[in-house]
Amino acid sequence: MARRGTPTACRYAGLSLIELLVAVSVLAMLAATVVPMVGLVSHPTQTNEAAERVGAALRFAREEALRTATPHGVSFTPGSASDLIQVYRLDTAASPPTPQYTVRNPLSRQLYVEALGAGSPFPDVRLETQPVVTANGKAAALSFTADGAPAIVQGAALLRLAGTGARIRVVAKAHSRDVLAAAETGRITIR
């Protein structure tokens, strides 16, 4: 057994340069394997979070319609690189009813606008081309009447949805989530 302070005892106290290089190499190979998998995991997460944001915008528009007794809604504008989601107040005095994009987010006090796609927190998430699907066809916006029922603007009228309600699909690669608005109640769910 070697005594303290002898060269033999000091030799076993640390790691050699070769041992350190081997450990760093193994960690680098593990990182190279794990990093591509993180990108795959983010698609479901991005889809879920984007669907939650769409649902929050719809819930807010419905609550504002009930609070102010004025129709409110959400427009969905698909673009080439990103999609916009905007909350509006519906001017029913105009013919046809016209969206007024003056609604502010209660937290940021900025105009209530969300983005999906390039330049957003959800770069891989997009909306369908005509996002709002109803029994009456497809639309680019979903409104809520003064009593909170979902409706779409059709021609010069605000048409309440009856029967099946509305669906907005959020997609990232092979992952998708549906944001649903119940026909009579306007209740928003995510499936």
Image: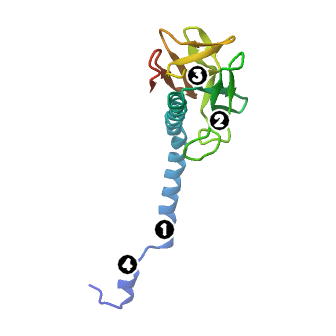
Residue 106 image position (x, y, % from top left): 55, 43
Specify the amino acid type for callout 3.
Answer: Ser
Q: Residue at coordinates 59% horizontally, 26% vertically from top-left?
A: 73
Mark carried by residue 12: 4
Depth check: give the residue in front, 170 or 153. 153
In-front residue for pair 104/26: 104
Q: Earlier in the sequence, mark 4 or mark 3?
A: 4
Asked if residue 21 lies left or right of residue 153, the reply is left
Q: Which amino acid does label 2 sit on?
A: Gly
Q: How many labels does the image show?
A: 4
User: Label 1 is placed on what type of residue?
Assistant: Leu
State the residue position of label 3. 143
Q: Nearer the viewer, mark 1 or mark 2?
A: 2
Residue 117 disc label? 2
Mark 4 secondary-structure assignment = loop
Label 1 crowding class (10 Å Cα cut-off): few <14, some 14-19, many 20+?
Answer: few
Residue indicated by mark 1: 20
- Which of label 4 and label 3 is nearer to you? 3
Badge nearest the viewer, 1 or 4: 1
Badge nearest the viewer, 3 or 2: 3
Separation of residues labelled 1 and 4 (CA atoms): 14 Å
Q: Compute the Cα span from label 3 to label 2.
A: 23 Å
Left or right of 160 in this view: 19: left
